[in-house]
Amino acid sequence: MYNNNPTLDFNKKIEEDKQGNIFFKEQVVSKTNDENKKFYIESYGCQMNFSDSEIVASILNDMGYASTRDMEESDLILINTCSIREKAEDTVRKRLRVFDKIKNKKPGTLIGVLGCMAERLKDKLLHQEKLVDLVVGPDAYRDLPNLIATADDGDKGINVFLSREETYSDISPIRLGSNGVSAFVTIMRGCDNMCSFCVVPFTRGRERSRDPFSILAECNDLFSRGFREVTLLGQNVDSYKWKNPDTNEPVDFADLIEMVAQIHPDLRVRFSTSHPKDITDKVLENMAKYENICKYIHLPVQSGNSRILKKMNRTYDREWYMDKMRAIWRIIPDCAVSSDIIAGFCGETEEEHQDTLSMIEFSQYSMSYMFFYSERPGTLAARKYEDDIPLDVKKRRLQEIIRLQNQISFRKNQASIGKTFKVLIEKVSKRSDTDLAGRNSQNKMIVFPRKDAKIGEYAYVKVTDCTAATLKGHLVDAPEV
Ligand code: 5AD
Ligand code: SF4
């Protein structure tokens, strides 16, 4: 029942800015006939948005919309938006101005805003950006056929209803920009955590978990189509919780990764994002038990200081986080850990900032996404605390964090020289056609001369050199066990 539409050919461009924000621009090429209506979609923000765009593409495909990478020839231009920081919203506004020009040239074109900004700004968007025809929140994509019909009739289509149940579990995503090797699979939606800086609980609503049978069916289908890696996605995967309505049997996240790992030893399992308060030893033990569950955890610390963590409402303190790191090292000694870090949260002192630096040193993250605090309207922090750290101080602290993280990443890369890793080959290297690139279990990209290796296969690579970002090496025979 899952789509594998051979008439579509996808091509994704991923851009990463200096702070590690990832922007996905899906450009979807259609080879379907010209009389079809066409849509064009761009996504910004987190992997979850990227994954949602694949659900939207599937719904539009069912409506008979073909896709195009040329926005000028499209009848429907969609932008899947992010509200997490002000800068992300500014970027989207700039893109809307570009779309406006196209609509001026071709008045029938519909323009739709999807995702978190749609949810946060609601009908304000229709008034502020007069040429926007559709505003669709993250739980309302099934309503797209109605909303598009309304907009075609000249009215504005808006649905920002947040659901307690919607998981789109029966919709088979169309893989946008796929390399045919790795895919994202959404396992839960929303977030109940209420970190005080974060707008996500307001834009994505309450936490709900997807039926594990539909998750397994999607992963099985991906494997049978040649995919070799799934990344299970959720704002807080460790609070995945599902109860079989017939037997009352519970399934938690540790059970789920075990079930997915058992699909096939050649299917790698990754997941993101983990929350330090919820990740359990049972998850870590299952990671250690299955070779195909990747030894990599994205475990955002946000701050290394207990007073700031309390103000952030993270519900753990510095000691708790350090204990989690110790548990990871004990149970999975070869595990890599990465983090998200915020510099300059409300009231943060220089000493508290130093605690963040010492936490980065303690944790030895393989990489981090690092930001300075950006107040978001409506969040707990915006209501309770003054955003009182001057921008230049925020930026200086962020630079110190970035500098330290870069040193650690480089040191860790250097320590990999001489080691051999099993990699899943994902693509041709950006820099040279004669090189391939694949990641090891710890999520590190390794580039090597291709010889006769093929994308989608596993290979063993010995690391011989590195930069701050990548490892370089050459193919070797499988080590004897
Ligand atoms: N300001 C800066 N960074 C933020 N993040 C979330 N909200 C904010 C904000 N208001 C960061 C957190 C989170 C990541 C996805 O984005 O580090 O883990
Ligand atoms: Fe935002 Fe915290 Fe939920 Fe992550 S866990 S989405 S930071 S509220």
Image (cartoon, helix red, strand yellow):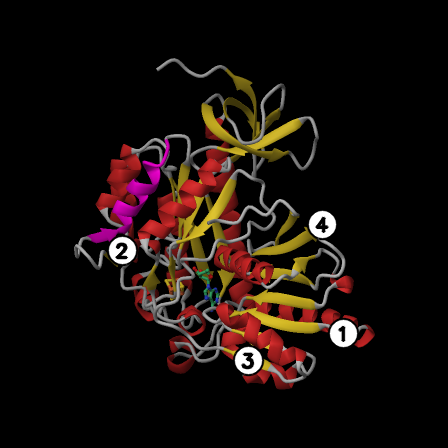
Observer-side mark, 1 or 4, equals 4
Question: Disc 2, disc 3: CB below 8 Å?
Answer: no
Q: Callout 2: few (<14), some (14-19), or many (20+) C-alpha neighbours within 10 Å?
A: some
Label 3, on which residue?
158
Label 1, on which residue?
103
The residues bearing labels 2 and 3 have C-alpha atoms spaced at a distance of 36 Å
Q: Position of residue 441 (x, y in %)?
A: 43, 34
Q: Callout 1: few (<14), some (14-19), or many (20+) C-alpha neighbours within 10 Å?
A: many
**Stretch in magenta:** 250-264
The residues bearing labels 3 and 1 have C-alpha atoms spaced at a distance of 19 Å
Front residue of 328 and 69:
69
Which residue is found at the position 76% from the left and 58% from the top?
A: 34
Q: Amino acid at mark 4?
A: Lys
Query: Element at badge 2?
Result: loop
Query: Element at badge 4?
Result: loop
Observer-side mark, 2 or 3, equals 3
Which residue is found at the position 27% from the left and 42% from the top?
A: 284
**Looking at the image, residue 226 lies above or below residue 373:** above
Q: Callout 3: few (<14), some (14-19), or many (20+) C-alpha neighbours within 10 Å?
A: many
Q: Amino acid at mark 2?
A: Asp
User: In the displayed structure, does residue 1 sit left or right of residue 391?
Assistant: left
The residues bearing labels 2 and 1 have C-alpha atoms spaced at a distance of 47 Å
Q: Amino acid at mark 1?
A: Lys
Q: Could you tell which of marks 2 and 1 lies nearer the N-terminus?
A: 1
366 within the magenta span: no
Q: Could you tell which of marks 1 and 4 lies nearer the N-terminus?
A: 4
Label 4, on which residue?
31
The residues bearing labels 1 and 4 have C-alpha atoms spaced at a distance of 24 Å
Which residue is found at the position 61% from the left and 74% from the top?
A: 148
Question: Disc 3, disc 1: CB below 8 Å?
Answer: no
Label 2, on which residue?
278
